[in-house]
Image: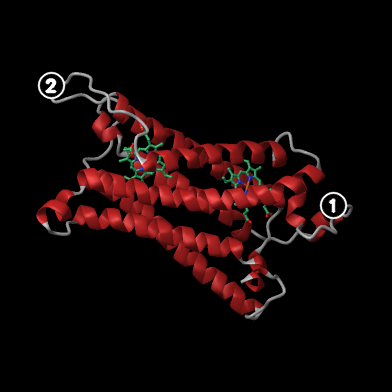
Amino acid sequence: MTILFDPNFQLLREDQSIRVFNILLCISQGCGVLAVLLVAIWMGSYENGFAWSEDPSREFNYHPTFMVMGMVFLYGESLLVYRVFRNERKKFTKTLHVVLHTMVLIFMVLALKAVFDNHNLNRDEEGKPSPIVNMYSVHSWVGMTVVVLFWANYIVGFISFYFPGLPVPMRQLIMPFHQLAGLLIFMFASVAVGMGIAERAAWKNSCWTQHGEMCGKQLVSNFVGVFSFLYTICVLLLVANPRWRRQPLPEEEQLHHLTSSMSHHSMQD
Ligand code: HEM
Ligand code: HEM
């Protein structure tokens, strides 16, 4: 398998390789957009739409919607930045990577607020406060692990590579861990999404289990999971192929000539 990650292993001509990249990119975008669209339809139409804390049961609906938009779609887009804009200046791609990850953070925090409000502000049928316990399911535990690891990678990434920025040898040391952690967290974000869908379906999608028929809501929610997984797989494939990696621009080689003997040029800034 390691041969697949060898940049000198070339099965395709350059133009063919670029074509495969473009096709895979289109498929990834199709799956990502479908995942976001379907979760919005599921929560917006089948689950009565959105509200803030004035109606905690509908506030929940922001949770899956923002998690899929942030932790799946925008997260994946942020990783693709270094592949799609591989001929742009590093400053541009890095800034875009940071901006997209910051948007992921905002969506994630709002999604967490939505589900915690939904539990803490819950009322019984008579309108009396009746909070639901927090953090009981395996979904919430895996989800929270993903959230904490994401924050850690964000803080370390920001300080090391953006502001104030660490010295080059430190960056070289941290970068492979940053990349590996970033990819693993991305994979487990979609695992958490799958578990979240199952969690919700177990409580709310009773059409199949109780009435024996596959209703629209069940179909839509299942497809949210499938398209999230397919999007994640496409992004991982696009990021893994060394031929589609960003190479330093000629002027950047000049700028970093002291360190350009490194095997992985991109670690330099
Ligand atoms: C990466 C994405 C996700 C993360 C990090 C995440 C995280 C969490 C966390 C930490 C909780 C616990 C909240 C509490 O105890 O008050 C929770 C609850 C919940 N989430 Fe998610 N979630 C994600 C995606 C989803 C999705 C797509 C759904 C689909 C509907 C979903 C459904 C639920 C449900 C039903 C609960 C309440 C029951 C429970 O605590 O397990 N989640 N989520
Ligand atoms: C917010 C501050 C961040 C900064 C300044 C930053 C910076 C960078 C830089 C400079 C690269 C190298 C790109 C290259 O190969 O040329 C990179 C790659 C990467 N980053 Fe970040 N990053 C940040 C946040 C994050 C976060 C929060 C995650 C995920 C949790 C993440 C995941 C990744 C991954 C997976 C790669 C490898 C992508 C690839 O090979 O194309 N980053 N980051």
Residue plotted at (65% across, 70% down): 2
Q: Relative to residue 263, is residue 39 depicted above or below? A: above
Residue plotted at (77% across, 50% down): 268
Front residue (pair 148, 267): 148
Viewer-nearest of labels 1 and 2?
2
Residue at the spot of label 1: 256
Q: Amino acid at mark 1?
A: His
Q: Relative to residue 188, is residue 114 depicted above or below? A: above
Screen quadrant of the N terminus: bottom right
Viewer can see residue 225: yes
Residue plotted at (31% across, 53% down): 38
Residue 107: x %, y % from top left: 45, 38
The dot on residue 126 is 2
Asked which quadrant contains residue 129, the reply is top left
The dot on residue 164 is none
Q: Relative to residue 98, is residue 93 depicted above or below? A: below
